[in-house]
Amino acid sequence: MLITYPLKTGLYVNLTNRCPCACDFCLRNNAPGVYGTGSLWLEREPTVEEVIESIEHNLQPKITEVIFCGYGEPTERLDALLEVAAYLRENHPGLKIRVNTNGLSDLIWNRSTAADFKGKVDTLSISLNTDDEEEYNNVCHPKFGLKSYKAMLKFAKDAAGTVPEVVMTIVDEPVTSKEKQARCRAIAESIGARLRIRPYETTGDSELKS
């Protein structure tokens, strides 16, 4: 069961396979695995203790960042995520901590969650995916329906005043046209976030939500 996996200077944490979305372009649907590691499907969700043990086992001198990113939405296990992040803050204060998320944790937990990350996370990377609410619903298939897009934007705006860095991501062509990319950049900048355009991958060579 692959709980953590190193890549370049990052150590990635595969916390859960649960996700409220079923995005058309998600690697877990389009590739056999990521980074040459094989499948990230979990036999069961690892305990906090198992996650910490796996992190400690796989930490290398070159690792500068721990990223919560796997085959599921890490905020589905928000309490576990924050507990692991707090452990890292205390025991490895030099490491950066990033969460790659679809930004729907407010809907998952039925409350505002951005403040929970304060002091524990350096970067929230949020999947914007498109500039249009209806298209977002059609492409990402969130179980919460049309209210998901506005909830994601609100979470991003709240996060921009909570954590040091907020990045909003979209997938490059052919998923997102240049015209849409420009509109997405304007949305991100209006929130106080930076836009990142990630490549469209079907081979498992890049992050799921980076």
Image: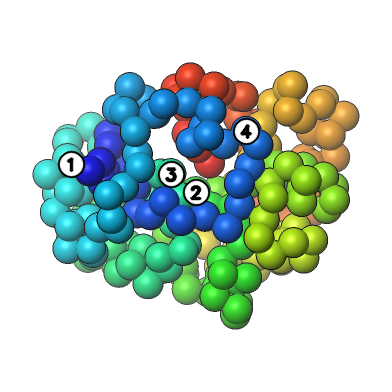
- Distance CA(mark 3)–CA(mark 4): 13 Å
**Residue denoted by label 1:** 59
Tell me the residue at 46%/63% (across/down): 76
Query: Label 3, label 1: how many angstroms apart (C-alpha)?
Result: 21 Å
Tell me what residue is drawn at x 78 percent, y 46 percent.
Answer: 138
Locate residue 46 relative to residue 58 in the image: left or right. Answer: right
Q: Nearer the viewer, residue 201 or 198?
A: 201
Q: Which mark is residue 100?
A: 2
Q: Secondary structure at mark 4?
A: loop
Q: Position of residue 104 (x, y in %)?
A: 61, 62
Q: Residues within 10 Å of mark 4 (few under 14, many from 20)?
A: some
In screen coordinates, is 52 left or right of 95? left
Q: Mark 3, mark 1: which one is toward the viewer? A: 3
Among numbered discs 1 and 2, the one appearing first in the sequence: 1
Q: Secondary structure at mark 3?
A: loop
Marks 1 and 2 close (CB-CB < 8 Å): no
* Amino acid type assigned to the residue bearing label 3 in the image: Tyr
Q: Which residue is mark 4?
A: 25
Spatial CA span between label 1 and label 4: 30 Å
Residue 98 position in % (x across, y down): 43, 50
Residue 80 drawn at (x, y percent):
33, 67
Q: Nearer the viewer, residue 106 or 61?
A: 106
Is disc 2 placed on a helix, strand or loop? strand
Circle 1: residue type: Leu
Residue at mark 1 to residue at mark 2: CA–CA distance: 19 Å
